[in-house]
Image: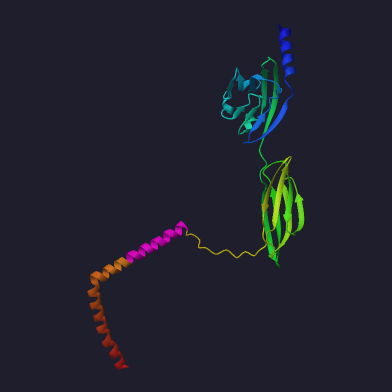
Amino acid sequence: MRLQVIWITILQAAMVKSLKEVSGYLGDNVTLPSEAGASWNLSKIEWSIFTNNTWIATYRNGRENIERFHQYKGRLSLNTTTGDLTIHNLSRKDAMDYSVDLENAEGQNTANKIKLTVTERLQKPNIEVTVYGPTEGNCAVRLRCSSDDQGVNFTWRVKLPIVIVTNTQDHYGSSVVAFLNTTQSGAEFTCTSIRQNENNSRSVFPECSVKPPPTPTASPLSPEKRCRYGVTVFVGVILGCLLSAVMFFFGDQIKAAWKFIKGNLRPLHNSAETEG
């Protein structure tokens, strides 16, 4: 019995082909090939993961089931003719080893293993622009290109006849310094980040021009100042109301008193002139 188990294990290992590597991008779709023979009429397809062969997609007796495992529900497509399995909307959790067991109508069996890696697409690089000047109609422009991705290289493409002074690159990005003048327009600097077979670019259009000074704007009042001005206005309103009330109720008395004062002051003034 033990000898039989050993032979079965050896035969299964012989039927499993060498591990094939497939790569997909985060959020994209990827197809895992079963590598079934072109002439095979498949009667059984079993896609599984983990060492305990957890099924995620099966086809048996003409019936397909691609909703077997919660991680892949709604994200699988099984080609029952070729045995290929397509995973939609890839996530990082999908990166693992997959196994497929196949059987054709003649009862022949084969197995295959696929290693799936999931990577993120190369992002657009970042460009930081610093303009120095202008002085005597010219200015210097420094452009720094960097990327949030790791393991990338950078190249620059420049349009218009611009004098490039320096072009340096390090592990974190690439920089160029160029001279522009105030009569030039439409100068274009394009930085391209490259990683293996991927690349992505970003362009900027710096200008060498004198910018008008910013228009001064009134700074908003602080809460403390707003409170102070509010109290002042409130007091002014109260005093105005009190003065109006006094004039309304005591206006006649005030006018009579003012006439009395004027009448008594005039003789004193005249007598003073006479004595002089």
Q: Identify the residue at image location x=73%, y=47%.
A: 154
Q: Nearer the viewer, residue 221 or 15?
A: 15
Q: Quadrant of residue 21?
A: top right
**Residue 232 falls inside the magenta stretch:** yes
Q: Identify the residue at image location x=77%, y=57%.
A: 165
Residue farthest to the top, as pictured: 1
Rendered location of residue 213, percent (x, y): 59, 65
Rendered location of residue 65, percent (x, y): 58, 22
Q: Nearer the viewer, residue 42 or 132?
A: 42
Location of residue 217 with respect to 45 vertically, above or below:
below
In the rendered view, does 250 fall on the left or right side of 33? left
Q: Nearer the viewer, residue 252 or 163?
A: 163
Main secondary structure type of the part rendered in magenta = helix
Location of residue 4 with respect to 152 vertically, above or below:
above
Q: Quadrant of the C terminus?
A: bottom left
Q: Quadrant of residue 94?
A: top right
Rendered location of residue 72, percent (x, y): 59, 28
Q: Identify the residue at image location x=73%, y=25%.
A: 19
Rendered location of residue 96, percent (x, y): 66, 28
Q: How is the image coloured?
A: rainbow
Q: Quadrant of the N terminus?
A: top right
Task: Please report the bounds of the magenta region as a residue range.
Answer: 222-239
Q: Identify the residue at image location x=31%, y=92%.
A: 273
Does residue 52 appear anywhere in the picture?
no
**Residue 22 falls inside the magenta stretch:** no
